[in-house]
Image: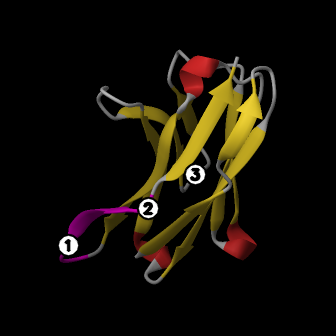
Amino acid sequence: VQLQASGGGLVRAGGSLRLSCAASGAISSIRVIEWYRQAPGKQRELVATITRADSTNYADSVKGRFTISRDNAKNTVFLQMDSLKPEDTAVYYCAADSVTTTVVARYWGQGTQVTVSS
C-alpha cells in the first residue's frame, strides 16, 4: 500500500483547507484510514478515522470542524478542515491499516504541512 498526502498550505484562522490521501497498491486490504498530526515539540495525535464501513471518528479537538470522507472511485480519503485555528498548525499524515491473510501492517504517507496564522 502506498499513500500520497497533499493539500496542506498556509491559511488564516477561520479559513478552510482540504487534505487528500490517495491510496494505491493493495487497496482491498485496507480496513481503516486515519489522519494524524504532529505539531513541533508535541507527540503525534490521531485526528480522524474512517473505516471500510464508512464509520468515522474524530478527536475532541476537531469535532464539528473537521470532516473525513472518501471517494472510492478515486481511492482517495479527504479531510475537510473548517474553522481552522492556530493550534491546528502541524504536519498532517495519513495512515492505512491493512489486513491480509498473512500480514497486518500500517502504512504511512508523507506529511503535508498545515499552517494557520492568527
Q: Is residue 44 above or below residue 4?
A: above
Q: Which residue is mark 3?
A: 53
Magenta span contains residue 102:
yes
Q: Which residue is mark 2?
A: 110
* Residue 61, percent from left and from top: 54, 16
Q: Residue 103's mark?
A: 1
Q: Is residue 92 visible?
A: yes
Q: Quadrant of residue 101?
A: bottom left
Q: Is residue 54 above or below residue 84?
A: below
* Residue 104, percent from left and from top: 23, 65
* Residue 64, percent from left and from top: 71, 19
Q: Marks 2 and 3: CB-CB under 8 Å?
A: no
Residue 31 placement, left or right of 55: left
- Badge 2 element: loop
Q: Marks 1 and 2: CB-CB under 8 Å?
A: no
Magenta span contains residue 89:
no
Q: CA distance from mark 3 to mark 1?
A: 21 Å
**Amino acid type, mark 1:** Val
Magenta highlight range:
101-110
Residue 36 placement, left or right of 105: right
